[in-house]
Image (spheres, grey):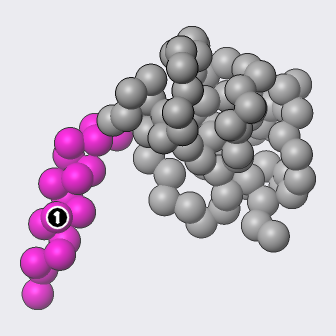
Amino acid sequence: MPGMTCWNCGVDTKIEGMVMRSDQCESCMADLRSCRGCRHFDPTRRFQCRESVIAPVQPKEKANFCDFFQGRLRGSAARRNGDPAQDSKSGFDDLFKD
């Protein structure tokens, strides 16, 4: 089973199982059990989440108790601080490269 990567710096956290609310990245000290560290985080969706949350969780970078939380796995295509519109355009353009 692949481990989790830090949403902030991309470092492998070596966490293989459950992510605790108190877990932080050893490299940058970012809270790992946060919206930004969740595989369901999507800045283009309502409340920035792919799950059916009924209220926004704020702030997205701080630890929380969300029941939908699932850590981002190594090798997953996690969008970090990029522009979602530009990421989509780049992906589309890449389809037609020779």
| Image coordinates for residue 64, horizontal then vertical, percent | 73, 20
**Looking at this view, is 53 or 29 the one in front?**
53
Dominant secondary structure (helix, strand or loop) of the stretch shown in magenta: helix
Which residue is at a point 78% across and 60% down the rendered structure image? Answer: 3
Q: Which amino acid does label 1 sit on?
A: Phe
Residue that protrudes farthest toward the bottom in the picture: 98
Q: Quadrant of residue 27?
A: top right
Answer left or right for 12 relative to 83.
Answer: right
Residue 85 vs 87, above or below: the answer is above
Image location of residue 28, percent across then percent down:
70, 32
Q: Does the magenta stretch include residue 86?
A: yes
Is 14 left, or right, of 33 in this rendering? right
Measured as percent of width and height from the top left, residue 11 is found at: 68, 50
The answer to whether residue 9 of the structure is visible from this angle is no
Instruction: Give whichever of 31, 71 is nearer the camera.
Output: 71
Instruction: Give the secondary structure at mark 1.
Output: helix
Residue range corresponding to the magenta coloring: 82-98
